[in-house]
Image: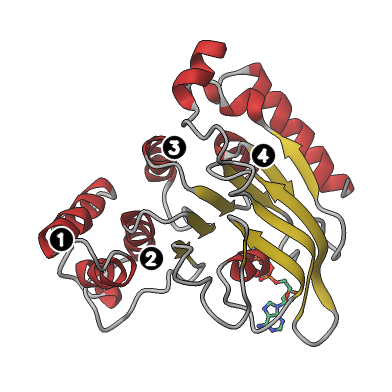
Amino acid sequence: MEKEAAILTPSVAGKSEDQALVARALTVDYGEGPVLGPLDLHLPAQGIYTVLGPSGSGKSTLLKAAAGLLPGFGGSLIYGGRPIGSGKAAGAEIRVGLVPQNYGLLPWQTAIANIRTALKIARPDEDRARREATALRWLELMGLSGLEGRYPRALSGGQQQRVAIARAFAIRPDLLLLDEPFSALDAVTREGLQRLLLESWRQQPSTMLFVTHDVEEAVLLGRKIVILTSSAGHPVLIDNESVFFLADEDKRDHETFYEQTRHIRRIMREGR
Ligand SMILES: Nc1ncnc2c1ncn2[C@@H]1O[C@H](COP(=O)(O)OP(=O)(O)OP(=O)(O)O)[C@@H](O)[C@H]1O
């Protein structure tokens, strides 16, 4: 186990504390009463954290707050020691990659142009050839070679979703926010992308908040699992290291994986 942990854990010693994503008494109210919180979280940097909860429990709202896209919220949200503001993107200092539920692609740009645009904004100092190679590589990794020149309207839902994932990864963000990123994909593509996500994270360990409805996916990918309950209130934070540090090929068949999914299903049923 120790050997595996050494292989699988990126070297983040000393970094994770001061770079953590921290929510303190975070509350969100769109005008008709609180829909999230008060929420307290401390998620060390460079970890994958999966977020589960019933429909309407505030998962997307949490991601929007972390992306700095809400007009306002109560309490505080801090990443890397800096407050994430409201009403504006999280700020030039924090590079944020976001895969929203509706993919957020620019409809007037082709698949590759969507990635180019994001790279131009997030990596203005990189030369053009490098940005182009990055965009092409991510499209290829997502199984989209040959579709670079297509506009979003000429792509299937699952293809659009993969362009959005490619765009988010390509910018090498500090904070990667994914809202049900694999929901439109078939089971085989989904499993392939789950593996790719873990591999990419190991090579480029960002702090990742990953919203999903799928308990197995949450257990497979998360180092910790945040469970939001149906009413605004206390989230449950589950330590999932015993599964996280298993070798990928063993995870799904492992007794620990099975036990953890059962445990989480029970919490989701009982709300605590
Ligand atoms: N812009 C908005 N204005 C008013 N209410 C909103 C807005 N966005 C979300 N809500 C409400 O806030 C609550 C939380 O919504 P949110 O989308 O965060 O839930 P979710 O857990 O992501 O749901 P789902 O799993 O269905 O995607 C819901 O009751 C929703 O109706």
Residue 64, percent across and down?
60, 70
- Which circle, 2 or 4, is nearer the viewer? 4
The residue positioned 63% from the left and 52% from the top of the image is 213
The residue positioned 26% from the left and 52% from the top of the image is 138
Query: The residue under label 3 is which amino acid type?
Result: Leu
Residue 232, percent across and down?
85, 65
* Res. 250 in view: no
Tell me which label, 1 or 2, sits earlier in the chain: 1
Q: Would residue 158 be found to the left or right of residue 120 on screen?
A: right
Mark pair 3, 1: CA separation: 24 Å
Mark pair 2, 4: CA separation: 29 Å
Tell me which label, 2 or 4, sits earlier in the chain: 2
Indicate the colouring scheme.
Answer: secondary structure
The residue positioned 36% from the left and 37% from the top of the image is 203
Residue 25 versus residue 32 in the image, above or below = above
Front residue of 75 and 149:
75
Instruction: Give the residue at mark 4.
Output: 224
* Res. 18 in view: yes
Residue 133 versus residue 124 in the image, above or below = above
Residue 237 versus residue 83 in the image, above or below = above
Q: Which structural element holds mark 2?
A: helix
Tell me which label, 3 or 2, sits earlier in the chain: 2
Query: The residue under label 1 is which amino acid type?
Result: Glu
Quarter of the rendering containing residue 87 = bottom right
- Which circle, 1 or 2, is nearer the viewer? 1
Instruction: Give the residue at mark 1.
Output: 132
